[in-house]
Amino acid sequence: MVKQHKQLSVASLTSPKTKAVAYIRVSSKEQEEVGFSLDAQLKFLNDYARAHDMEVLHTYMDVESAKVAGRTEFGQLVQFLQSQQALPPGSSTCQTVLVEKTDRFYRNVHDLVIIRDLGVTVHLAKENVVMSPGSRSHEKFVHGLNVLLAERMVDNLSEETKKGMLEKAQQGIWPSQAPIGFKNVEGPNRKRIVVQDEVLSPLVKKMFEMYATGLYSTKDLAKEATRIGLVHRKSGNKLGKAAMYDILNNPIYYGDFIWKGVLYNGTHEPIISKELFDKVQLMFKRRSSCPTGRQKHDFLFHGLMTCGHCGCAMVAEIKKGKYIYYHCTGNKGKCPEKYSREEVIDQQFMDSLERIQLDNDVVDWIVEVIHASTADARKQREVQMAAFTQQKQRLEARLDKMYLDKLDGVLEKDEYRRLSSKFRSEVTDVKFSLHQLQASGDVKTVDGNRILELAQKAATLYSAQNQEEKRKLLNCVCSNSTWAGGELTVNFRKPFDSIAITNDEYKQKKVTNPKKSDLIEIWRPLPTLHSHVTF
């Protein structure tokens, strides 16, 4: 492959030679990679220069769509020719440009005017045409028509490209450059599709999971992304807050995508679940509904409570250089909530966590129930996976048959698009269901054990933890806590809400000294312990 800005000189056997510059172009990086025309153009122009006794001083080459304004090398070529005109009279200047043909050089009338105003000679080598200020009027007229045809070709190509991209979108295929976390590969029928990037997709998923906790801002995530190597694919630049915001709000990561303002069901494998995406959107909504503002210090309960009177955030500030007080922001107007010391709030969170702290007897019984149900759950999962696998095979067989029917003319093109889009969407749903079942394994059992462990030690852990660990534990267990009139109201996340209610009843009944079996009966039916816990 030829490198840009390569100095090209034709051996000087006679003198003097006409000085010239050459310009070559391909319309995209893909065309360069498959050897579409760069090498061929370069060889052709070198042969032409040699045959016409020219010395090529420099070759400019653009590897980009010429439909897009700002061709870098074309602009540099114009600057070079302008600098040649500024040389003192009598200097040996370059006033000749070598190109392969019209549509390699001009893409619109504006380009033609720029080159014409420079007063240079243009050799359209493959067309065997030389245009100069001294060319005849009819030659200029034909040349102008060729430029207009080239411009029309660009417009037609653009229209066809847009049409093809829309068709891909309607088939559920993302039609452009893969967003970060995905990569473009060649799929069935040689169509470019997006698949998960094995390295970056887990990192993108981690960004969603972190933001959903409510403990991190987009700025925090941008820093974490840099630390773990999640950067822009091409440039390698860091992801800023804006880029992180775009990622967290892009539906392509859960399986859908927006193209030209329309939401389509994608056929690609999602990186995250729709449930996680919705959690992130809810967190954005909560942050925007009552902003807490920036705080200089990282206070323990920042972002974990709202005012029970008006719903605004509770923020902290330091008094007398050492005492931390929390108060309502009052963003919705004057609020009656008074200032409260952090130690008071800390103790009430501790008391709330004691509601879910379980006795050892209860934990032992629940563990036995979980383990006994594991075998049945595994059998049920295997039956479900077999059913989904059969359904997937049937749908794929239908797609294959429809494609053959389209090739044989049995099925109209529009009908094929409609039906194939429908069945691909169904295949995606089935694949996602299979993926969830395969990934789950004994995760529910593991999650259940972790939840029990946390519930058993929650208050004890909290009392011994540092500030950051306390925040993580509270965010894991609690949700939408409110503070009003000096009282904390904790809304527990699932399944800790059920555990707290049942444990309250258990403790009340335990005071009357009933039989152990009667106490255990309070826990029937067993609270669902399959919620995902992130530490």
Image: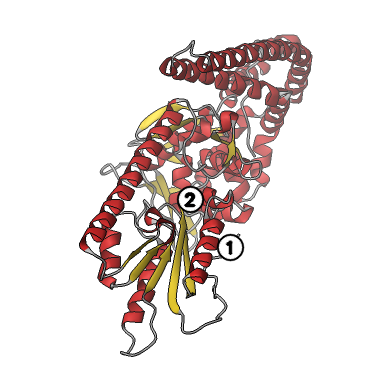
In this orientation, which residue lies closer to the viewer: 15 or 443? 15
The amino acid pointed to by label 1 is Val
- Mark 1 or mark 2, earlier in chain: 1
Q: Is residue 29 visible?
A: yes
Marks 1 and 2 sit apart, C-alpha to C-alpha, by 15 Å
- Quarter location, residue 530: top right
Q: Residue at x 49, y 64 (%)?
A: 45
- Residue at the disc numbered 2: 28
Q: Residue at x 65, y 20 (%)?
A: 434
Q: Measuring from the top left, give residue 330's x and y in whole percent.
A: 31, 45
Residue 202 in the image: above or below residue 68: above
Residue 443 against residue 39 in the figure, above or below? above
The numbered disc on residue 2 is 1
Badge 1 marks a residue whose secondary structure is loop
Is 110 displayed left or right of 261 in the figure? Answer: left
Q: Left or right: where does residue 90 sit relative to residue 230?
A: left
**x 45%, y 32%: residue:** 257
Q: Position of residue 290 (x, y in %)?
A: 35, 42
Q: Quadrant of the N terminus?
A: bottom right
Three-letter code, disc 2: Ser
Quarter occupied by the C terminus: top right
- The vertical placement of 179 against 438, above or below, is below
Q: Is residue 83 above or below residue 76?
A: below
What number is the disc on residue 528? none
The residue nearer to you, when weighing 46 against 500, is 46
Position in image of residue 352 (x %, y %): 56, 33
- Tell which of 449 and 458 is nearer to you: 449
Farthest left residue? 137
